[in-house]
Each structure stands twice: as structure tokens, then as C-alpha cells.
Amino acid sequence: MSEALRYVLLAALFLFLYRVVRVVGDDLRAAGQELDRPWAVLLVEEGPGMSPGEAFAVRGEALVGRGTGNDVTVPDPEAGLRHARLVGSGDSFWLEDLGSPAGTYLNGRRLEVPAPVRHGDRVRVGSTVFRFLQPRGPQAAGG
Amino acid sequence: MRDRLRRLAALHIGLFAVVAAWVGYWQVVRGPDLAHHSENPRLLLAEDRVQRGRILDRRLEVLAHSVRRGGRTVRVYPKKEVFAHPVGYRSLLLGKAGLEASADAELLGMAEADSWRALRARAGRPRRGLDVVTTLDARLQREVWLALGPRAGAVVVVALTGGVVASASRPGFDPNHLEETWAELRWSPALPLVDRALSGLYPPGRPFGIVVLSAALSRGLVTLHSPVDCGGSGTQRIHLVRDVLTGDCDRALIQMGVALGGRVLREMAEALGLGQLPATDVPAAAGGFPELDERDRDALARVASGEGGVLVSPLQMAAVAATVARGGERVSPYFVTALRGELGVVDRTPARPAMRILAPEVAHAVVEAMRVSGKGGVPAVSGVVRAAKESVGWFVGLAPAQRPRLAVAVLVEGATEEVANRVGQKVVEAALRVVR
Amino acid sequence: MHPPDTPCTKRAWWRGAELYALALAVGLAGAALVHGNKHPQDPPLALLYVAVALLAFPAVDRVLQTGEGVLLPVTALLVAVGLVTTYRLQPHLVAYQAAWVCAGLALSVASFRMARRPLNPQRLATPLAALLVTVSLFPWGWAWVERGLPIRTPAEAAVVEAASELAKLLALVLGVAELTRGKVRGSVVAAWAASATLWLLRGDVGTAAVMVWVALALAYCATASLGPVLTGAGGFLLMAGLAYATIPQLTERLRGWVNPWADRLGAGYPLVQSLFAVASGGLAGAGPGAGYPELVPQSHAGFVLAAVAEEWGFGGVTALVAGYAVWTGRAVRAAGQAGAPWVRLLAAGAAALVASQAFLAAAGAVGVVPPADVPMPFVSAGGVSAAVQLALVGAVLAAPRVREDLR
């Protein structure tokens, strides 16, 4: 019994390390590719339970919603569990509503179909307002 | 900033790598030596998880056993100081001695005296060690102990087998209260911690004549009936070689030794086990035999009279006498006869390869000479010799008088030949009474 | 331009939970082994405490939603090792330790929320410097008060421990407040030097070394110049050398470190016993509860690595040290993602604070550096240190969220 437990202990310890090393390795590889992928930031302007100035990095794809398991979690009762998503395509990002009852607003207009977002746009999810920042995005460079 | 942070992380991770490598060095490379280091207290502690076996005498009387007392295991020695030296002791603070040390692996129930790793591998499951059955005889040991004076040692060996039936040394100590009395014992001028029977080394004096006579007879230098010149004045009684051990004729012994030469004497002494570690299962002293220059007749004469750097223990002298009594086949004394466990008994009597040291006629002739010199009816040689600061008395004898089967060696510190002889006779009587 | 047609990624709910489950498995298996080997007759309450403390980690992760999937699980693993070791060496403390871990996690949530706020800490530097010196004086003051009392208070050790932890934390926060501008005033250097000297005078080289280490790490990150760092390190080594030469208790300790085998029953005793314990562990160790780490003096505090090495073996020690290395790397990575200089410094300094203590504690136990009685972060029993370090974890986790540069 205690022999078996000892093996469980060592196995759990090293399985843990193995998984951690995998994650760290993935992150390091991702950091290497970061320059090629579009990245942006969602900066909180106002929202329940959020402090203005708080930032969420967005790389590739980001889910926004109230539930856990999102990349950007908003502690906002009006937001849906899985509310919206940002998807990188080429060098720009698209905002898509995921069928939330309260709706997703881009610059004050309710989103019906996925729309491209530009540097400086306002994104509202429930009652939480973000500013979308993509300093090296195409629009920012253009304008 | 990024580069600086990267360097900061690299520095710390590098330091962790150094620590891991260093731990690996101590744990894996140096691990085995340190884990078995004599000062690593873990071995003694790991033993507490094993119920240590008992030490028994040849009639299975208990000489040492373990008892649970107040939540911890205590080693109890019911015979107290009588068996203190041969049985020894086991103490967390002071380590182990005697049979407790030499039969340690068996008492712990380990197949081989390997490491505490083997012990630890079985930890958790309470297990019993093996009982060690010895050749010692509790009754005889007590009688020998009582016969000895305040500072003395004695050994009784069964001549045919080499089994040690008694091995006593006085003063003794009570191994049940060793830790409390350790300081006092350690610094006592009477040296109670020294086992005079096994580890006490003394010049042999006249009993060394057994060696000289054996060599002379083996070489054909003399026969028992050759006349010898014992010097002396007045009545010019004719002495024969058979008289040389009596004490009246030490001069003839010395002449024989000088005539034989140092090399022959050394060979015979070593063949009989002097100057060598006794092949016993308990630690004992080797003694010594001096380097001799063949032209230095004085040194040779001193050696032939059992002085001049020859050092022997009572155990070794008993083994010499036993070899003679066994008809010239070498006797190696031993203590452990068997191991008893839950599964049965294992015989541990050492194999006795026949190793002839003396021709049977020579051995019989030496016994005859001892019979002549014996002053109490049994073949014996006694003598007195100047040791470091005082004289010590010796008695080396065989019993019974006809077809001897027991060999006895007694050493009494600060005593005359008569005292040693008297003690020796008492030991012989007790041995004959107890060991049948 | 077309909208991307990539499907919405599905994330398995257990994705992040796996590491916490493994840490919990380590903690429970270790505690069960200790229970079976050492206290089989007692009710296994310790398993409950371990489970509660370790389940608090995924709960905090849910609340914070950091997206940093390694730092908090690795902390949970280190805490698991620590709780098992505490149960092994000081079984009466395991409930307190678990409670302190939970309190520390609550603090980490608080510090996470606090660190996200935009903050201008520079005006705090002067009061922080004063506070640092005051805290460093506190053990002296306590000793002075005790001399006036008719009895000795049992709290002295706790007071000194708490003061030491606070001093280390304040040295960090002061450095962050001062160095955010990229330069440092003489008065702040003087405060650092004075408090380090106060700790050296008490014979507590460990606290002084950690304070100086953190200050120098911050200075390097903020100013990029090695000159002041080397000057500071040299000055500290000089002071420490003086302390080792003049304070008898430290001289003794140094002698036991230089050649422990020469005086293995005296000055070298702790280190020799520690090496015996390490060596007796071998590759796989005796198993928690099956060794003899109590033979090593201070095995619950400064020599805790010896206890882990004996019972968890080289495998366990490697995992533990690798855990610290990963922790440090991830904390520095979080610092690099921070978008405000002060929070970047805070995260980097927190990494240096934890890493330096882990290194000094581990290295001291096997004789790489002189034993300095530094508690092992997250592992050594000690309520205040666990709380302080977990609070720092919260601040580190908050660092990537602070993007003042983008406002």
C-alpha cells in the first residue's frame, strides 16, 4: 500500500513537471512566432468589477465572456457566459457576437455580423466597455 | 529591460542548476559512502524497527535479549557483568562490542551484513532477528568468573572442536547500565572495559616453552628422553627434556630456543596461531612476535623464555594447548554454533579443515612434558613473567589428565605463579564438573 | 476582406485543472504516506487540511482568470511539498500552515486587484524607507522591552520572523517605489544599508542577504548599469565578512561550513548531519515519513532541503528545484509583459525575492553557501512568510494586465 503510494507520489510529481515543461515550451515557441502574428490589447475603460486601465492581451483568438474558460473574463452580470470573440485574420482582427442576449456593440452599433475592428475602436460587452488597441495594426499605421 | 530581465532569470535558474548538481553529487555520487558512514546515526535507529534476536548459551540460557519498556526497546543482559566481555553490549551512544557487534547481521536477521538500506527496505514490517546460539556455558562461566581474582582473564576451549565454553575477564561491568557508568568505566585504572581473555596481550613466559619444545621435537633436535643441562649447583641430578616445562630447567628451554634459531621459532609460533588474528567470530587481539636477528643470541634467549616482545592473549594460549591436546591438528576457537529463527535452526559451526601442525607423536610428547610439569594432577604449565609494570601469572593446562578434551588458559595480573596455578586448578575442576 | 471562418475553439474545462489535480495528488499522497509511517493511530485530519489548502489554489485561479497557466499551479506544488514536510516535521503546525496558505491566497487576490490599479508609487519612497528601518529595529526593541519584563515571552521568535519577512517585503517595495524613476537617492541607499546592517548585527545573515540581493536585482533591472550593483554586492560581502569575523556565533558557523568534517560534533554538526540525511536519501528517497530528518538540527527551518532530500530522494529534490526555476522564469516573464515600469519592477523584484531565498535555503543546506537560516519559500513552515510570498504571487499575476503604456 505504502509502496504504491510512493510510486503515485513520484509519478504525480514528474507528470506535473512534464506538463509544466510542455506548457512553458509552447509559450516559448509562441513567443518566437509572436512577431508574425497580429496582437492587440483590450483595455478596460469601465465595467463592474474591473479597474480602468486593466489590459488583456489578445493573440490569434480571444473569447470574451462572464464564464471561466474565456481569455477575457468580465465579472459583469449583463455579459453572457460566452459572449463574443476576437479573431485575428491576416494582420487585422474581427469581432464576432456569439449569440448573446444583451448583444455586442462596436463603436455604439450593435453587431449583427462579424466586423473588422480597428485601433482605437470601442467594444461594449454587457455594460463593460473596452478600447481595442492594435498599435501596429493596418489602420493604426494608415491613420 | 527585456534583456535585463532575461539575464536576471538566467542568473537565478543557473544558481538553481548549481544547487541541483551539488545535491546530486552528495546524494548520488557520495551517497553510498555517507549512508554507510560509521557516524551516520541512521543505522542504529533503523535497527529499532527490527526485533533484535537473543544471544543464548549452549544450553539455550538467555545471555542477552530485547524487552519493550516504556515504549522503547531495551537490551537486557540477565547475566550482568559475568558475560559482559564476550557478549558485549549495544548502545545508541556507545555503539556495539563483543558478540553484539560481531553477530550483528544475524541478530538483525539480515542475510548478509550489508547496509541499512537492506534493513530499511524491510522497515515497516516488524520482523524478528535470529537468535544466536553460542558455545558458551553460563554455569561454567559463572564458576570461572568467581575463581578469577580482581584482575584476571580465563578461557576454556573444547579441544576437539575449538568451541569456547568460557571466556571471562575481571573486572567486568554491568552492560545494563553502561551509559550511566561509561565515564567512570572509561577512566578507571583497572581498565574494566578491556577484555583480558580475548584482547589482553601479555608476554607468555614459561608457557611459551610449549612452542619451543614443539619446535625442538618436530625438528628432531631432541627427544623427550634426551638429557639436558639445567646448570644449577650442588646435586648434579640428571634432567631430561621431559622436565623442561616444570620450571626447574628454564635454561635448557632457552638453549633449545637459541639452537633452533629465530626463524624456526617464528614459524612454529605462527603455525600455532600466535602473532596472528585468532580465527574467531568475535574480535580478538593478534598479539605480536618480534623481528629477530639470528646473530643476536640475547634477543633469541629472551624470546625463547617467552619475553622480549612476544605478546599473546589467553585465548591464543588456550588455542595452543588445544592444538597439542588434539594431537597436533590446529584448533581455531569460535563462539557461534547455530542461528535459530522462526523457520528453524541453521548450523554455524565453522568447518574444521584438518590442518596438521605437529606430528601426533610430537603432540603426545608435549602433553607428556606438560603432565610432568603439572602441579595439580593435570597436564599444565604455569609461570610468572614481568609485564609492563608488574608480574603476571600464567596457567596453561589440559583436562582431564588422561585423554584431555579441554584446554584452559588463565592469566592473573599482579600475581605469583602459585596464585595463577591455584586459580587454574579451580578453573580446571569447574570445567571438568560442568562440561562432560 | 472576408471575416475569418475559423470555428470557435472548444476548451476542455479540465485543461487548467490538470496541474492542480496533480499538485493535489502530490500533497495527498505525501500526507497519506507521512500519516501511515508516523501517526497511523491519529485521525488523518492533516489530509483534510492539505486538501483544503490545495483546493484553494484552483478557486483563486477561477476568481483571478489570469490566463497564466503555470505560475499558480507551480506555487500549489511547492505548497504541497511544504505542507507534507510540515506535517512530517511539525505535525502540530500543519493546520496553522494550511490556514496561513488560505490567508495568503486571499491576500494574493487582494494584491492582484490592487496591483492592477494605476499607481504612482514614487511619493511613497520616503515613508517606506522609514518603515523599513523601523521594522528592522523591531526585534531590538522587542528584546529591550523583554529585558524590562519579569518573564520571557514565547512570542519573540514569531516577532523576529514576522519582522524579517516584513523587512524583506519592504526592501522590495521600497526599491520598486524608488527605482521606478530609474535612479535612486542616497537616503534610500542609506535606509537599505542601515536595515541590512541591523540584521547582520543580530547574526541574521540570511535576511540581510535577501534584502540586499533584492535591492541589487531591482537596481540592475531599473538602471541597466552593473557598476552600482557590483559596488553594492562588494559592500555587502565586506560587511558580512566583518560580521562573520566578529560575531562569535557567526564565526562558529563559518568554521563549520569551511570544513564541517574537522569538527563534526561541534561547529560542523548541522552541516554534517544534513549531508548524512541528503546522502541517505539516494535516488528515490525513503518515502515521506520513513526517514530520519529529525536528526538534522533545524530541519524544519533552514535545513528543510535535507528533510526533503532524505525522504523524497534526488528525484524529489530535482522536482522541487526545477519547480523554483520554473516559478522564477514565469515570474520574470510576467514582469516582461507588464506595461508599467513600476509593476515590471515589482514582478521582477518578487521573482528575485523568492528565488534568492530558495537558493540560499537550498544551497545552505548542502554547504554551497554558509547556512544562513533562510526559510524556503512556500515550503518551510512559517505563517507570515507563506502569506507574504503568496501575496507577491498575486502581484506577479497582475503584472501582464497593467498596460499603462497603451492608455
Image (spheres, rainbow, N blue to C red):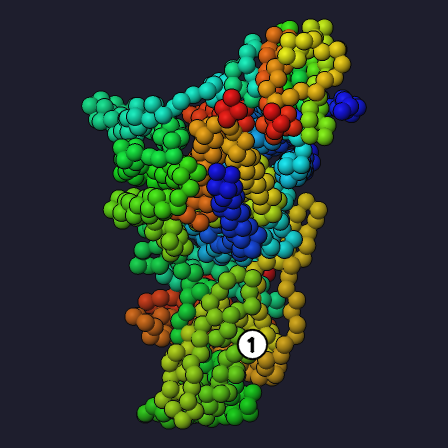
Decide: is C403 above or below C290: above
The reply to whether residue C98 is visible in this rendering is: no
Q: Is residue C131 left or right of residue A137?
A: left
The one nearer the camera, C357 or C285, is: C357
Q: Residue at x 34, y 51 (%)?
A: C255
Decide: is B273 above or below C328: below
Q: Give the residue type at disc 1.
A: Val
Q: Residue furthest front?
A: A143
Q: Which residue is mark 1?
A: B324
- Residue B123 location, x and y as percent? 61, 41
The one nearer the camera, B35 or C239, is: C239
- Numbered marks: total: 1
Dot 1: what SS? helix
Q: Residue at x 55, y 65 (%)?
A: B280
Q: Is residue C269 left or right of residue A106?
A: left
- Residue C200 location, x and y as percent? 30, 39
- Residue B355 location, x and y as percent? 63, 76
Q: Is residue C311 left or right of residue C303?
A: right
Q: Residue furthest left?
A: C148
Category of crowding for the residue at label 1, using alpha-carbon neighbours closer than 10 angstroms: few (below 14), some (14–19), many (at least 20): many
Where's the N terminus of chain C, which quadrant?
A: top right
The reply to whether residue C167 is visible in this rendering is: yes
